[in-house]
């Protein structure tokens, strides 16, 4: 991938990983991005995951030739970017590591090498001249680890944005995709909890003249940057991106599923164009979470199980709470053959979240949806239009 004449991409695509962070399916893989700024003092921007060491070292050597880097900037210590810090520090004993106080507090937790005389500690707004390029550092705590910082290169107006503006999907993927789709799934599942911190970072970024965004995952962004920044602004403020409805169900034998599908069909028949239906037992949970944040309304349908919720619904709501789900309208459908409690359990979990309006009407099905249940579902659909 070409960045600029002086800024070289040395990242690696990982197309074989089964689960990113041991939890997210990535059908199109993921990229671990790393860059080298060629100047008087050659500077490497982050490393890559241990899964990609060999290819990354080869990319690095190809760019450096017989030269040695002066600095390694560490934006983020999470192992998908930092796994090779010790390796590169040992390869280039004269190289210094640039980070902030928190970086160097946490770095020894991951590695075992002598940092004496090897560190350059920077703080908010500090600048580091590396020749014709000047790096300026801005702290981005909890986007999404405490030590995260972003780097602005002043001469070419490049923002090295750490995990911000990243997405799932290898850079050299066969699938043409719409950036927002996998960027949104990445954002809400990985960074979603930290909307306030992302807002703080966007505020800092708004004071910079940015021509290129170099994230740690996914493509380098060079055009129409306002589009991406606007998406991040909407997502991090927890505002719905689209008017639409997510219908998500947790069904044991298919009867709750039938009710959820009937509900989705009614929304469609009544003209709701953006509608997504998820089987929480089988569909990708991360995608269901993404859809919950994307739309302004949600209907959740769950079987009662062991006097509580069917586990996938409990898991879904626990994820939403941990990602700070808020400012949405939700309607409830429960099912239970002898003592239905799912609606109350779902309401209890939703009430612990911020600014959730729960539709007063609730549908309670006993085992199998009947005509009267269909009428009750239609009432909640009307109330949600
Ligand atoms: Fe891509 Fe937070 O690491």
Image (cartoon, helix red, strand yellow):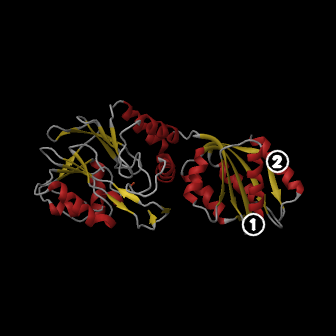
Marked residue nearer the N-terminal end (2 or 1): 1
Q: Secondary structure at mark 2?
A: helix
Mark 2, residue position? 378
Residue at 77% x, 42% y is 270
Q: Is 217 located above or below residue 284 in the figure?
A: above
Residue at 27% x, 64% y is 55
Q: Is residue 186 left or right of residue 72?
A: right
Please tell me in which quadrant of the rendered image residue 50 appears: bottom left
Q: Secondary structure at mark 1?
A: loop
Q: Name the spot of residue 281 as percent of width and height, x first.
A: 64, 65
Q: Is 82 located above or below residue 3 in the figure?
A: below
Does residue 114 show up? no
Q: Name the spot of residue 119 as percent of width and height, x first.
A: 19, 51
Residue furthest right as drawn: 372
Q: Quadrant of the C terminus?
A: top right
- The Cα atoms of the two marked residues, 2 and 1, are separated by 20 Å
Q: Name the spot of residue 29 as percent of width and height, x first.
A: 43, 61
The dot on residue 254 is 1
CA neighbours of label 1 inside 10 A, class few (<14), some (14 to 19), many (20+): few
Does residue 14 show up? yes
Q: Is 30 located above or below residue 380 in the figure?
A: below
Ligand 1 within 8 Å of disc 2? The answer is no
Q: Is residue 177 left or right of residue 369?
A: left
Ligand 1 is in which quadrant of the figure?
A: bottom left
Residue at 79% x, 50% y is 362
CA neighbours of label 2 inside 10 A, class few (<14), some (14 to 19), many (20+): some
Label 2–label 1 contact, CB within 8 A: no
Q: Is residue 349 left or right of residue 266?
A: left
């Amino acid at each position: 991938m070409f960045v600029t004449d002086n800024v070289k991409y040395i990242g690696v695509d990982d197309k074989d990983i089964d689960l990113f962070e041991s939890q997210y399916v990535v059908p199109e893989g993921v990229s671990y991005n790393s860059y080298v700024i060629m100047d008087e003092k050659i500077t490497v921007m982050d490393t890559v995951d241990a899964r990609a060491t060999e290819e990354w070292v080869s990319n690095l050597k190809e760019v450096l030739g017989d030269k040695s880097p002066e600095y390694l900037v560490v934006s983020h210590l999470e192992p998908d970017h930092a796994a090779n810090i010790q390796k590169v520090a040992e390869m280039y004993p004269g190289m210094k590591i640039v980070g902030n106080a928190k970086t160097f507090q946490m770095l020894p937790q991951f590695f075992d090498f002598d940092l004496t005389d090897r560190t350059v500690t920077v703080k908010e707004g500090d600048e580091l001249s590396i020749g014709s390029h000047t790096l300026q550092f801005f702290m981005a705590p909890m986007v999404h680890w405490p030590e995260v910082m972003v780097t602005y290169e002043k001469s070419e107006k490049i923002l090295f944005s750490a995990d911000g503006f990243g997405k799932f999907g290898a850079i050299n993927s066969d699938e043409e995709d719409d950036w927002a789709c996998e960027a949104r799934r990445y954002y809400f599942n990985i960074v979603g909890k930290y909307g306030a911190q992302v807002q703080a970072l966007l505020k800092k970024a708004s004071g910079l003249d940015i021509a290129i965004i170099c994230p740690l995952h996914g493509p380098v962004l060079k055009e129409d940057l306002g589009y991406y920044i606007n998406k991040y602004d909407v997502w991090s403020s927890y505002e719905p991106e689209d008017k639409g409805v997510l219908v998500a169900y947790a069904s044991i034998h298919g009867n709750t599923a039938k009710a959820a599908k009937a509900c989705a069909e009614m929304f469609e028949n009544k003209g709701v164009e953006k509608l997504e239906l998820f089987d929480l037992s089988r569909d990708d949970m991360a995608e269901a979470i993404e859809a919950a944040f994307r739309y302004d309304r949600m209907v959740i349908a769950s079987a009662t199980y062991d006097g509580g919720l069917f586990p996938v619904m409990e898991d879904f709501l626990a994820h939403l709470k941990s990602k700070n789900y808020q400012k949405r309208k939700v309607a409830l459908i429960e099912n239970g053959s002898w003592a239905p409690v799912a609606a109350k359990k779902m309401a209890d979990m939703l009430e612990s979240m911020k600014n959730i309006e729960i539709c007063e009407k609730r549908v309670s099905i006993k085992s199998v949806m009947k005509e009267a249940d269909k009428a009750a579902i239609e009432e909640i659909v009307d109330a949600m239009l």
